[in-house]
Image (spheres, grey):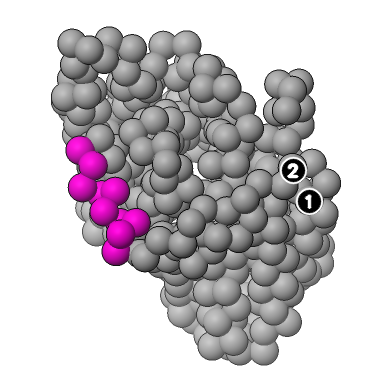
Amino acid sequence: MGTLNIPIRSWVLALGTFAVGTDAFVVAGFLPEMAAALRVSEAAAGQSVTVFALAYAIGSPIMATLTARLPRRLLLVTALVVLGLANLGSALAPSLPVLIATRVLAALGAAAYTPNAGAVAASLTTPQARARALSIVVGGLTLATALGVPLGNLAAQQLSWRGALALVAVLSLAAAPAVHAVLPEAPGSPAVPLRTRLAVLRHPAVLRVLPLTVLGMGAAYTAYAYSVPALEGVGVRAIGLMLFLYGAGAVAGNMVSGYATDRWGAGHVLTAGYTVMALAMGALAWIAASGAAVPVLAGVLSAAWGASSWCQTPAQQHRLITAAPAEAALVVSLNSSAIYAGIGLGTVLGGLVLASGVAFLYGAAALLATASLAVALSTTRAAATPAGSRSSDR
């Protein structure tokens, strides 16, 4: 397998993760319209987002176990087909219970696809380029972060919310034959019971990585889940532009992270990322508390916020795969679970402090980012050994 083909495969795999990410984020763009159509409150309709995240977080390691023996190409193609059909079901759902059921099915398809796409991308390249391949695949998710909500809102305005979900289904089903065309045959892994697989959690290096994913994503999403009131609280009127800048920063941060991790190591990338996040959140808290209206600065800080949020994932995945290469798909799936757990943590914390004011919202995010920085520094030091001066955590 020549290295010239690796970017092509990685980009096609990223098309699938873009479909997964769009599916996860798109509902926020048309939640009021969906609630009205299903004759439920917006809070009730929002449970479809919660259910998707919960099913993904729990289902990811379970799906890694149940699908272990399937050939990788067959698994990835089947997962995209399931994702597409589930979204068609969501688009046609006549009631909230049916919608919830189809969202669970979509989450299981997503949980089967994303971790294995990352593991396959890593296996098709050299160790020196592994983080870059991972960053391309994760880039599909970060691009969906940038475009998912505005695209969902635009599609809902032009086609209705059902049409928007149908477009996600088409995207998923279109990605399936593309993945089949570019991936070589690759065998699955031996069947291993879930309890045995989860024994990897006793690995000290894995235990260092996963809690940091939860904490870091919690810091990133404390304010993002409430981005509209949060941005209005710092004097921003062009909310769409600020969300675009956040997304552009997320894409750039993810791609730079892949290169930087290969070049300088995951520890340096995470230290820089959490430092930037803490400073950006702290500056936004100061702007909100002072009542100043500085939209240009807010735009720069929004881009830094996005970049620091999504520079975490390639570095963290690289640390996990290096720590447990024989269980690459499983540890990446556990990291995906940790990402969604962190998003849930951040969303809950943000909801609790939002009533106290936007300054407290950003302040809570800054505190979590600072805590993430402290954990990153301590785990990097713990990973450094006299015999391991070229550790992936260096």
Where is residue 129 drawn, in percent x and y? 56, 20
Q: Residue at x 71, y 21 (%)?
A: 3
Q: Residue at x 68, y 35 (%)?
A: 10
In this view, 100 is above or below 75? below
Rate crowding at label 1 as few (under 14), some (14 to 19) or many (20 or more) other CA atoms within 10 Å: some
Q: Is residue 150 left or right of residue 170?
A: left
| Tag 1–tag 2 contact (CB < 8 Å) | yes
The kind of residue tagged 1 is His
In this view, 82 is above or below 175? below
Rendering quarter of residue 367: top left
How far apart are the alpha carbons under marks 1 and 2? 6 Å
Q: Is residue 85 magenta?
A: no
Rate crowding at label 2 as few (under 14), some (14 to 19) or many (20 or more) other CA atoms within 10 Å: many
Rendering quarter of residue 146: top right
Q: Which of these two is toward me, 163 or 157? A: 163
Where is residue 48 drawn, in percent x and y? 50, 73
Q: Is residue 250 left or right of residue 315?
A: right
Q: Residue at x 66, y 73 (%)?
A: 86
Badge 1 is on which residue?
180
Image quadrant holding the C terminus, namely: top left
The stretch of residues the image draws in magenta is 195-204
Q: Main secondary structure of the magenta part?
A: helix
Where is residue 232 drawn, in percent x and y? 45, 44
Q: Which of these two is toward me, 3 or 346? A: 3
Kindly state the secondary structure of the residue where label 1 is placed: helix
Mark number for residue 183?
A: 2
Q: In this view of the protein, can residue 28 be seen by the observer? A: no
The kind of residue tagged 2 is Leu
Kindly state the secondary structure of the residue where label 2 is placed: loop
Q: In this view of the protein, can residue 310 be seen by the observer? A: yes
Q: Is residue 22 left or right of residue 331?
A: right
Image quadrant holding the N terminus, namely: top right
